[in-house]
Image: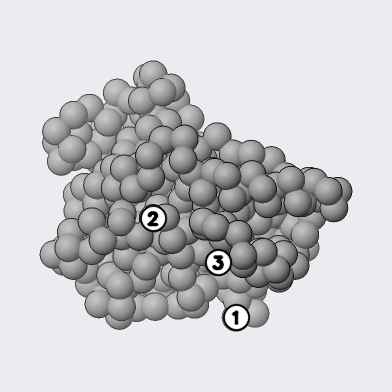
Amino acid sequence: MSVLLFPGQGSQSIGMGLEFYKNFNSVKQIFAEADEKLKYSISKIILEGPENKLQSTKNTQPAILTVSYSIFKILSEEFGLNLNSYKYFAGHSLGEYSALVCSESLNFNDAVYLLHERGKAMQEAVPIGKGSMIAILGLKTDEIQDLIDSRKNKKGICEIANDNAEGQVIVSGDKDNVKDFQIQLKEKNIKTIPLKVSAPFHCLLMRPAAEKMEEKINKTNFKSPKINIINNVTAGPENDAEKIKKLLIDQIYSTVRWRESILNMHKEGIKNFVEIGPGKVLTGMVKRTIKGANCFSINSIADIKNLNDKF
């Protein structure tokens, strides 16, 4: 059995999806739909930049969705993707919206709008320069949580934002608190990497963003997905439309439990992990977590042909 994976923020690059855009009218139509819904040319930002505009969260999120959905449509309509062999769809953070669109739970236009609003809300939740995120390498998630728990007397927020893979965990929170935690880790010879992000995502500082998005998400029509979605909050499958809405709201300030999601799918007999969208970030995470996993990353027409050959 197989799963389709959809990437999140950090996978973007100028020109992503260009080969598909040039070769397929249906992709041009998807890009045009996104432009029309957002009332500005997200297409131009995706294909031409500039870098600072693409990196702006309110643009990054709908941009990655647009490219991921475009590749999925070509894979399905032009190359006859057989969904019968796919047990789950899963997306990392904003990638969960891509998974929902491709499973026909959420309309593409609605998802583009929601992600643009989500990006704005997340950016506005914390003043620039007041939040921080760091990657911690080599420690188990439980060990990091124990270290965080041992410093509860510290003021402010410092939480696990992304449990990405074995030995790769992201911590998010107040700048001073995260910096203090980083110093503590350095004293223990634990490697950390500061992340170049515009806000401290997936921690309690994002509650105001979740509150802003609650009404917008609840007003949007969701259907039960045709393929079960592994959601980020529980790391388990969900196909109830109302529960999916609530989980998308909670996801904004909750830990992305990606490592657990991959392990849970593997326990369910998943052998093949196919990443659809820009970059190969999720493929790398799967390989770190499941030794010897069959991973495929689809960024080009040649990748699709290679996938069909291997399957």
Q: Amino acid at mark 3?
A: Arg
Pick the front one: 6 or 201:
201
Query: Which residue is tagged 1?
Result: 268
Q: Is residue 110 visible?
A: yes
SS at circle 2:
helix
On screen, residue 144 above or below 197: below
Q: Count the marks.
A: 3
**Label 2: how many Cα within 10 Å (few below 14, some 14–19, many 20+):** many
Query: Which residue is tagged 3?
Result: 257
Of the two numbered discs 1 and 2 on the same chain, state the one appearing first in sequence. 2
Query: Which residue is tagged 2?
Result: 206
Q: Are marks 1 and 3 in contact (CB under 8 Å)?
A: no
Q: Is residue 259 left or right of residue 42?
A: right
Where in the figure is residue 299, as x and y percent of width and height? 51, 39
Pick the front one: 89 or 253:
253
SS at circle 3:
loop
Which residue occupies 43% across, 22% down? 51
Q: Which mark is residue 248?
A: none
**Label 1: how many Cα within 10 Å (few below 14, some 14–19, many 20+):** few
Where in the figure is residue 147, as x and y percent of width and height? 72, 64
Q: Nearer the viewer, mark 1 or mark 3?
A: 3
Q: Nearer the viewer, mark 3 or mark 2?
A: 2
SS at circle 1:
loop
Q: Quadrant of residue 150?
A: bottom right
Q: Is residue 98 left or right of residue 260?
A: left
Where in the figure is residue 72, as x and y percent of width and height? 39, 50
Where in the figure is residue 21, as x and y percent of width and height? 34, 31
Q: Is residue 105 left or right of residue 84?
A: left
On screen, residue 259 above or below 121: below
